[in-house]
Image (cartoon, coloured by chain):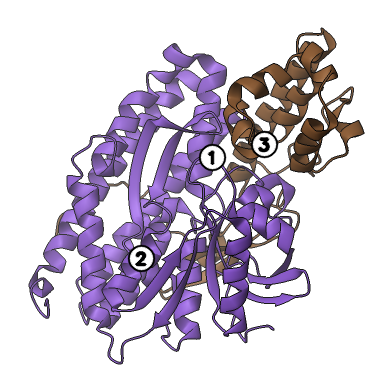
Chain colours: A brown, B purple
Amino acid sequence: MGMNPLPSRKLVMKKEDVPQHGGLTAGCREVNYAVDADGNYSLELSVGWEAKNATLRQAWEAIVERLHLVLEEINAGHKSPLAYHMVKNQMDVSLLAQYSGFARWRVRRHLKPQVFKRLRSAVLTVYADLFRISIAQLQQVPDQPDLCIEDMSSSGTPL
Amino acid sequence: MNINFSHRQSAHCESGVTANLLNHYGLECSEALVFGIGGGLFFAYAPFIRLNFLPLTTFRTAPGSIFKKAGKRLGITTRQQRFKNPVAAEQELDRLLANGCPVGAQTGVFWLPYFPPAYRFHFNGHNLVVIGKERDEYLISDPIFEQPVRCASADLRQARFAKGALAPQGRIYYIESLPGNIDLSQAIISGIKDVCRVMLSTPVPVAGVRGINFLARRIVKWPARLGEKRTLQHLGHIVRMQEEIGTGGGGFRFIYAAFLQEAAALTHNAALLPLSQRCTVIGDNWREFALLAARVCKGRAKLVPTVADLAQRLEELAVAEKSLYQDLQSAIAGYSIKGRE
């Protein structure tokens, strides 16, 4: 058997070491693997780990930032409201094309304000149904990004 | 028409689904055992595949392979189907449920309403078991959750036909029959051999132990190549892939250590026990790597010197994992020919 070259910086993952840092999971608990006092593996429930919450928050912050940028473009008249709903649903042109069934070049056209304004309701319905909003909601955008993620602000857990 | 199905929560969706299905048909086995037999452990850093605009880092094999390989190694007759037509997909699911057969399904997380909103990304490799239908609602044993959940049939249809990378195409899978005699030891040995093989000798440099070294070399270049902000996003993405719901912590290394512990008892091979402990230490070191990376993301540690530290930890992990798989190979060498048809 070769030696384990890893320095053991701390003790192995123990039952009592399974982190319980809440936030983001809306109360859902997940299974973590940890060893008990006898060195046997057992399944422990965890409400979260701050390292993970921090990076999950970071991913949502990136989406919120993209939403801010797209709102600026829409207000400047460069993009149609469809662009906002696309970004809000974490899609790009290619994914939106696959979901809507429209060719990519058509989706790209629909992102232009002049084209979007004149779209038939049959086309609008496809997008509205996909995003699960009404046509009226599809045609407008909020002043500020409206993602409904709870507890986006950093929790007090130290890292 | 609800099937009497015993729901057990697990860390990882696909091995949990497979274990729960096997238990339903009377083969007692844990999630970790299924994960190990199915050869689920892996590593790859594939910058040419993008997930949410960021390079793919994975700690497990491709979705679907654990069920397929575990089934094959245990000698179980399994069946899987994909569909073009969502209506046909739903009819087939309903028909199987009416026959009392619990059905595994691949879905896209984004469309599952019972997931906490913060977890709803376009990830199409999520597995669950459909165990019943009442009017317009399916009853689902989703191994990530503590209790069975309900899901409107329209939502499940959308999730089964999610688009993009790993599109499930309505994929369902189920167990048709179990053999009378199951050779667990043989299945365990094949599973371990498989993991050692892919981790030590995958021919492409992005996968296996070489993939860990590849990532280490790339990480140090990120600040200069991508700028600070993109680097932080890339680092955060690795941490999420490693610790996101479904890994059991430490990029599946803890689940695998639990498997090795069980395997030692089931194959009467005490040599696997110290290897299980080493696998736990490796998992702990992955956790430390994630913790340090997350501290950088949160602005608690300076990017430039820390990136070198992160790369060094990856190199150490690569060395430790390499020696673990080599020692695993020698620990099971005596079993390799026995009972092979």
Q: In the displayed structure, would residue B152 be above or below residue A54?
A: below
Q: CA distance from mark 1 to mark 2?
A: 22 Å
- Quadrant containing the C terminus of chain B is bottom left
- Badge 3 marks a residue whose secondary structure is helix
- Badge 2 marks a residue whose secondary structure is helix
Asked where in the image residue A144 lies, by quadrant, the reply is top right
Asked where in the image residue B57 lies, by quadrant, the reply is top left
**Residue type beneath disc 1:** Gly
Could you say which disc has been placed on residue B68 in the image? 2
Going from the N terminus, do you reach mark 1 or mark 2 first?
Answer: 2
Residue A5 visible in this rendered orientation of the protein: no
Q: Are marks 3 and 1 on the same chain?
A: no
> CB atoms at circles 3 and 2 under 8 Å apart?
no
Task: Report whether B84 appears left or right of B298.
Answer: left
Residue at x 84%, y 18% (from the top left corner): A118
Q: Chain ID for label 2?
A: B
Residue behind mark 1? B164
Could you say which disc has been placed on residue A100 in the image? 3
Q: In the displayed structure, would residue B173 be above or below residue B64?
A: below
Q: CA distance from mark 3 to mark 2?
A: 32 Å
Residue at x 44%, y 40% (from the top left corner): B289
